[in-house]
Amino acid sequence: MKKLLGVLLLLSAGCGTVGPLERRLEGSWEWVQSTGGIAGLHLTPQSEGYVQQLVFRTNGELEIWRSGKRLSLLRYRIEHKPTMLSPEPADVLVYDEPFRPEQLIRWGRGDTLYLIDVCFDCYVHTYVRRR
């Protein structure tokens, strides 16, 4: 019995834990707008002619949907670290895709999520939680 308990403890120690931030991100998010870029653009579903959703899963998967079709399935992780936009450590989405910028995570009122591209002249993307 003690050996079985020891094996179970060893196995459970190797399992990743899901933190409160992953739990808060979990679910579907509807794109509201993106602002920024070198031209200071303001993009919305109406101006671009499509709707977009992000679906975060606590297992580190992110699905991106556009007008009902899945565009991509990505792996992500959350790191607490300084960036070129935030010298103080901040929560950052890091993607396992080479050309996708990291994004600062910021929360607005209610169920509003801001994802801020970590680069100069990039975008601030606003999402609201889908119910």
Image (tube, rainbow, N blue to C red):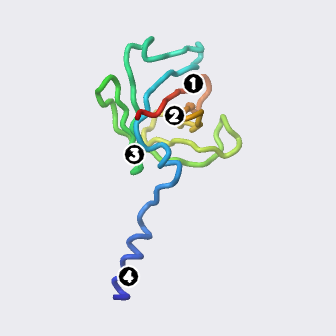
User: Helix, strand or loop at disc 3?
Assistant: loop
Q: Pointer 2: residues within 10 angstroms few (<14), some, or many (20+)?
A: some
- The residue labelled by disc 3 is 57
CA–CA distance in space, label 3 to label 4 = 30 Å
User: Which label was assigned to residue 101?
Assistant: 2
CA–CA distance in space, label 3 to label 1 = 25 Å
Q: Nearer the viewer, mark 3 or mark 1?
A: 3
User: Which label was assigned to residue 122?
Assistant: 1
CA–CA distance in space, label 2 to label 1 = 9 Å
> Label 3 is placed on what type of residue?
Arg
Location of the N terminus (image quadrant): bottom left
* Residue 79 drawn at (x, y percent): 56, 48
Q: Nearer the viewer, mark 2 or mark 3?
A: 3
CA–CA distance in space, label 2 to label 3 = 19 Å
Q: Is residue 110 left or right of residue 99?
A: right
- The residue labelled by disc 4 is 5
* Residue 115 drawn at (x, y percent): 54, 33
CA–CA distance in space, label 1 to label 4 = 51 Å
* Residue 19 drawn at (x, y percent): 51, 54
Mark 2 / mark 3, whichever is N-terminal: 3
Residue at 38% over, 21% down: 51
Q: Quadrant of residue 62?
A: top left
Towards the viewer: 60 or 118 = 60
